[in-house]
Amino acid sequence: MQRISFIGLLIAALLQTAQAQQHPSILLTRQNIESVRNGVTKFPLLQQSWKDVKKDADKALKGTIDVPIPHDAGGGVTHEQHKKNYQNVLACGIAWQITKDEKYARFVKDILFQYAAVYNTWPRHPKGKGDPGGKMFWQNLNDCVWQVYVIQGYDCIYDYLKPEERKKIEDNLFEPIVKEFAEINGEIFNKIHNHGTWSVAAVGMTGYVCGRKDWVDIALHGSKKDDKTGFLAQLNELFSPDGYYTEGPYYQRYAILPFILFAKTIQQYQPELKIYDYRNGLLKKSVNTALQCTYTNKAFFPVNDAMKDKTYETEELVYAVDIAYSDMQSGDDLLDVAQQQQKVVISDAGLKVAKAVAEGKTKPFAYQPMWISDGADGKGGGLGILRSGSNDDQACVLMKAASQGMGHGHFDRLNILYYDNNTEVFSDYGAVRFLNIETKNGGNYTKENSTWGKQTVAHNTITVDKQSQYQANEKKGEKTSPQLLFFNATPQYQVVSAKEDHAFDGVQLIRTAILFKPEDAPMPLLIDVFKANSEAPHQYDLPFWYQGHLTDSNFPVNAKKDQLLPAGDNYGYQHMWVNSDAKVNAANGVITVINNKRFYTTTFLADTGTSVCFVTCGANDPEFNLRNEKGFIISEKGTAKHTFINITEPHGKTNPIAEYTTGFKPLVKDIHLISEGNDNTMFEFTYNKKTYHITLTYTNKQSFITIK
Amino acid sequence: MQRISFIGLLIAALLQTAQAQQHPSILLTRQNIESVRNGVTKFPLLQQSWKDVKKDADKALKGTIDVPIPHDAGGGVTHEQHKKNYQNVLACGIAWQITKDEKYARFVKDILFQYAAVYNTWPRHPKGKGDPGGKMFWQNLNDCVWQVYVIQGYDCIYDYLKPEERKKIEDNLFEPIVKEFAEINGEIFNKIHNHGTWSVAAVGMTGYVCGRKDWVDIALHGSKKDDKTGFLAQLNELFSPDGYYTEGPYYQRYAILPFILFAKTIQQYQPELKIYDYRNGLLKKSVNTALQCTYTNKAFFPVNDAMKDKTYETEELVYAVDIAYSDMQSGDDLLDVAQQQQKVVISDAGLKVAKAVAEGKTKPFAYQPMWISDGADGKGGGLGILRSGSNDDQACVLMKAASQGMGHGHFDRLNILYYDNNTEVFSDYGAVRFLNIETKNGGNYTKENSTWGKQTVAHNTITVDKQSQYQANEKKGEKTSPQLLFFNATPQYQVVSAKEDHAFDGVQLIRTAILFKPEDAPMPLLIDVFKANSEAPHQYDLPFWYQGHLTDSNFPVNAKKDQLLPAGDNYGYQHMWVNSDAKVNAANGVITVINNKRFYTTTFLADTGTSVCFVTCGANDPEFNLRNEKGFIISEKGTAKHTFINITEPHGKTNPIAEYTTGFKPLVKDIHLISEGNDNTMFEFTYNKKTYHITLTYTNKQSFITIK
C-alpha cells in the first residue's frame, strides 16, 4: 500500500516534470503553437507584429554573428552589439517556432555556442559600474536583461538542440551566468529593488527552462531561501496593496516587465503556486495601476524622474497588457490599449488579444477616478486621480501625495497636475535628462535634474520661504509620507484631499482638489483649496507651470523689457528668470491662457499682500539643458496662515482654420472666503451668476465636503 | 431673310436666357440636383459634409430669425449675428434643394423678407471703418462677403419664390446692396485688390442670378466698363503668370475664394467667355500654386503676415479644390487634399470629388520642386521650392525671393525656410497676432508685428549692420524685387539661386540653396551658400531660427547664467534676449539640434572673425505677445565681402518609446572655401569621408552648378 502510494507519487512527479519540460513553455507554448501559427495569418494585430519580428530575424540572418569582447559603456559599440544579439536570439527563436524553418534555429544555436565558447574567458567589464559590476555590459542590470531575453529564445529552440548541444550551452554559458548573478552580484540578486527583480527573473526563468530547481528556489525565496529576499519578498515590499510602485509611474512601467515575465513563467511551470493570485491579485492590479497612471495622450504622469514622452506603447506595457488580458481576466477595455500599442507579443497571450480585437470586442479603456495608495502597507500616502469626460476630451487631475519614492523622487508633495482636452494644462517638468543622447551628459540625468527638476518650485505646490520640501534632503523625505484626508467620486463632484505635516518645519499643508461641474457648465472646474498653517509668518509661493500662451489678466503684467534676472540663489529659484512681478490689487486675480485651442482661466483669491510673478525656466543653465517652460507664481508674504483658493475653468475655443473664437470670457467670478479654521474652510464663488457655497471639514470623513 | 435671321437670333437669345435663368445654377444646378441628392446617401465624403450642412440648417430653423440693427464691430453681437444669418441662408438654401422640405425654403424667404424690410432704413454702420465703410458690418468687405453667400442661397430657393416675392427681395435688398457696393463704395469696387474682388464677385453673381446684365458688365469690366478695373483687370494684375498672389500664401488662400466662386458663376452663365482659360488657365494654376505653397503638415508657408496654423483644410481651399477638380481638369492627386480636408462643398463639384474618392482614384498630392514667379509680368522675383522624398517624410526648402507683397510684406528677402520629417526645422515667425482673440489687441496684429515680425532679423536671412532691409520702409521695398539667378531640379540635386541688390545700400546679396543627397546618405543635405558683396566693411548677421533643442556644438556655448539683455535697440534686435555670444575659433562651426526625434546638424564655414550668438525672442514685450522662439546667429564683423556656407544635415533618430538613439553624429565635415569671386564660389566638404567639390558660377545659366 505504502509502496503503491510511493510509486503513484513518483509517476505523478515524473508526469509533472515531463509536462514542465515541454518546450517552449513560456510565452509561446508547444500546446498552442499551431494556433499562433494560424493566427499570424489571420488577425491583423498579430500579423503585423509577426511581420516586424520576422523582419528583425531575417535581418539578423543576413549579418554575420558578432560576439565582441565587452569593452564599451552604455550606447557604445560592444554594448549595442550584445543588446542586438539578445534581441536577435529572441526574434529568431520565435521565427523558428512560427515557420519551422531551420535557418532561424541554427542562428540561435550558433550564436549561443559562440557565447558559450568565450563567456568564461571574459574578465569583469572594463567600464564596470558599481561593485563588482557587469560582465557583458557595464552594469549587472544589463547582463540580467540579456539573460531574460536569451532564455526565452533558448526555450524556443530547446527541442531543436541535441542533448549534448544543450549541455554545452547550459554548462558553459547559463551556469556561469547564474553564478555571476546569484553569487558574484548576489547583493543585487538579494536586493528589494527593480534591479533585483531583473536578476531573480533571469535566474528563475533559466532555472525553469533548464530544469534546475535549485535556481528556481533561490529566485523565488532569496539566496537564503528565507523569503526575506527573492521574488516573493519583492512582490511583498515593492508594491503597495493597490499595485503602485513607489518610484512612480515612469519607473513602474520599467519595473513591471521582469515581474510579469517571471510570474508568467512561474504560472507555466508551477501553476499550483497561484502566483497571479498572490497578494489579492497584485500583478493584475499593478498593470491596471500603471495604465491608470497615464492620461488620454497615452503618456505616463511624469512625476518624479520621468521622461515625458514615455507612453504605454512601450514594450514593457505590451507584455503587461497581453498577459493581463490573456491570463488575468482583465477586461475588454485593455484591448483599447493593445490597439493603441499597435503591437502584441508573438505568443499565446498576443494571439488571444489579437483575436479578440479582430472580433470587435474592444471597449474604450476604462479610466477611473481613484485613490492609489503608496507603501507596502498602503499607508505611505498615494496618488489621487480625478477624471471626468470621455477618453476623447477628458479632464484629469492628479494630486501627488505619495512617499518620497527613493532616489528618483522629487520634493513635490501635494503637487497637482491638470490635463484637459488631450493635453497638459498645468504640467510637471519631469526629469532633466536627454535619454540616450550622448552629447548631453552621456544621456544621463544632467546636474539640473537635482538643482531644478527635483526642487519644489519646479512643481505646482507651495514653496515656503523660497526653500524646497525637506530642504531637498532625500533621507529626511523618506521618513514620513503625506496622508490622505479624503477621496470621493460622486456624479456631482470628485474630490481628493491630503495633508503634509513635515515637509517644512512648523508648517502644515492641506490641499484639496475638486472637479466640479456647475449645472450649466460644459466642462468641470478645477477647484483648488490649498491651506498653509503655521504659527510664524512665512513667504508662501504657489507656482502653476502652465502650457499655452497668456491671453489676459485682470492686473497689469508689465513684463520686464530690457533685463532678466534669476528669482533667487538656490532651491531651483536660481533657474527661473523673472519676467514680471505684479501686485494683484483686487479681491480676485484672473489669469487666462490659451492652450490647444481652448481657454483656461484661473481665478484666485487675492488680498493686498498677493503678488503674481511670471517666470520662465532657464536661468543658470550654461549648457541649455532646460526647456523654457513658463509659470505664474502666486505669492503671499509675511503671513502665518493662508488659504489659496484657485478655480481653473476651461472655456470657449478658437478655430484657426475656420477663423472664429467663442467663449473667451470666463464665467467664474467673485471667489469669497467666508471663514477658515484649522479644520475647515468655507468659501463661495459664482459661475454664470449663480452662487456656489463650498464647505470643507477636514476632520469629518462623513461630511467632508458640501457644495450648495 | 433678314427677318428670319433676326427671329432666329431672338429665339437663340431667348433660349440662352431661359437656360441661364434656370435655378439653381451656380454650385448646385437644376440639371444635377438629382445626382447630388443621390450622392449624399452614397459617397462618404459628401454624406458627411451634407450631414454638417443639414445640422446647421436645422439649428437655424430652431432659433428665431434675428436681423438686428447693425451696431457692433468685428466679433461683437450684431456682427456675429449677420454673419450667422448669411451662413444660415446658404445652409437652408442647400437643404431645400437636397430635401425639398419646404421649411428650409421658407426660412430663407422669411429672413430675406426681414432684411428687405429694414435694409434701407439702416444708416451707415456706426463703427464704420474706412470711408464710407460698411452698412451691415463695419467694413464694406464683410458686407460683400455676406452677399456672396446670400446670393447662392437665394439662387437655391429662386424657383420656390413667387415672382412678386422675388421682386420684393431684389428691389428692396439686392438692388440697394449693389448700389452700396458699386457706387457708394465704388472705390473698393474698382480697386485692384482682394477687397475689390469680393465686391465685384458679389455684384456680378447677383447680376447673373437676378438676370441683370448691367451688374454683370460692371463686375467684369469695371464701373467704366473699360477693363481698367473689374474682375478681368484683377485677374490680370493680382496674380503672376504662375498664379501667385503677391501678398503671399496666407493671403492667397484668402483671396482665392471670390475669384473661384465668381469664375464658376461666369462659367455657368457665360461659358463662351472661357473664364477658366483666361491667362493660360490662370485660376487652375492659382489653386495649384496655393497648394504647392504648403508643406506636408498641411500648413501654408508662413511668409509675410501669416497665421502659422492656417492649413489647406480652410473653407476657401475646399471650394478651390472641389472646383479645380471638377471643372478644371486638375489631377487625381487633388483628391488627396480633399480627403485631408474631410469635406466637400454640397455641389456638383463636391459630388464629383466625393465620388472619385469613393472609387479609390486618390493619388498622393504631387508636391513638386518649382520656381513660382511673382509680379503680374512674372518679373517680380518669386518663391523657389525644393522638395525631396515622399509626402510621409519630405525635405522641403523654400527660398523667398518675392517682391515686397504690399502692406503685409516682411523685410525678409532671400529668407530660407527648411522643413523635414513633417515638421519645421528652420522656421518663420509668421505674424505677431492672436487672431480673433479680443483680449490681444482686439484680435488684430499687435505692435510687435511691425517691430518684430516684419524685421529682417526675425528671418533666416542676412541683416547688415543690425538694420533691416530697406530700413523697414515698405515704399522703398516695393520699388524693386529680388531676381532669380537659377533654378533647376535634377535627380542629383535641386537648386535655387537669387540675388538682391537694393535691400542694403552698397551691398549685393546672392543666396543659393541646394538639396543634395550624397550617394550613401539616407536624406538630402541642405547646402546654403550666402554671399554678401560690398566695398565697405559691414557686420553681417545670419540668423537661423530653429525648432527643437540644442544637443551639441563644437564650441563652448556658455549661456549667460544670471542676466539676460536685449541684443540691440531697434530693427527687431530689441526683441531678442542674448543667451550667449561665443567665438567659434575653428575652421568650421558645428551646431546640432534635436527636433521631432531626428538630429539636425549645421556645419558652417568659420574663421577667426566668426562668432555665434544664441538668442531667444521675447525682450521688450511687456504684454507677452511674442512666442519665445530660439535662434542662432552666425556673425561676421568688419568684412566687406563674405560668403557664408552652411550645410544642414538631418541624421539619426531617437526613439523615446523603445529608448534607443542612433546616428547622433553628423557625417558632414571639413567645409573648405577654395575660391570666390564676384561671379563664382568654389568649395568642398566631406560626407562620410568622401569629398564633394561644388562650383557655382552665378553668371552662367548653362553651367551654373557642378558637384563632383
Image (tube, coloured by chain):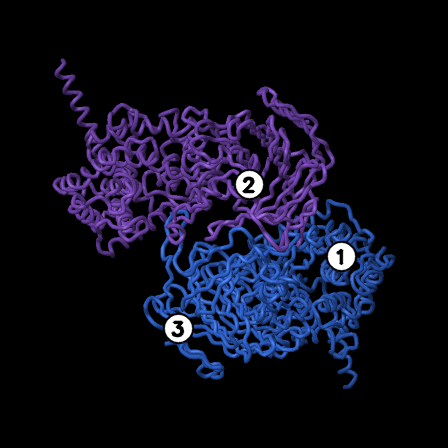
Chain colours: A blue, B purple
Disc 2 is placed on an element classified as strand
Q: Which residue is mark 3?
A: A672
Q: Position of residue A55 (x, y in %)?
A: 66, 48
Q: Position of residue B169 (x, y in %)?
A: 17, 42
Q: Amino acid at mark 2?
A: Tyr
Question: For the residues carrying marks 2 and 1, which lies nearer the camera in this image?
Answer: 2
> Alpha-carbon distance for marks 2 and 1?
52 Å
Q: Which residue is mark 2?
A: B419
In the figure, B38 relative to A469: above or below?
above
Q: Residue at x 32, y 38 (%)?
A: B348
Q: Amino acid at mark 1?
A: Tyr
Q: Position of residue A36 (x, y in %)?
A: 62, 58
Seen from the viewer's position, the closer of residues A32 and B678 is B678
Question: For the residues carrying marks 1 and 3, which lies nearer the camera in this image?
Answer: 3
In the figure, B662 relative to A494: above or below?
above
Q: Give the chain letter at badge 2.
A: B
Q: Residue at x 74, y 57 (%)?
A: A157
Disc 1 is placed on an element classified as helix
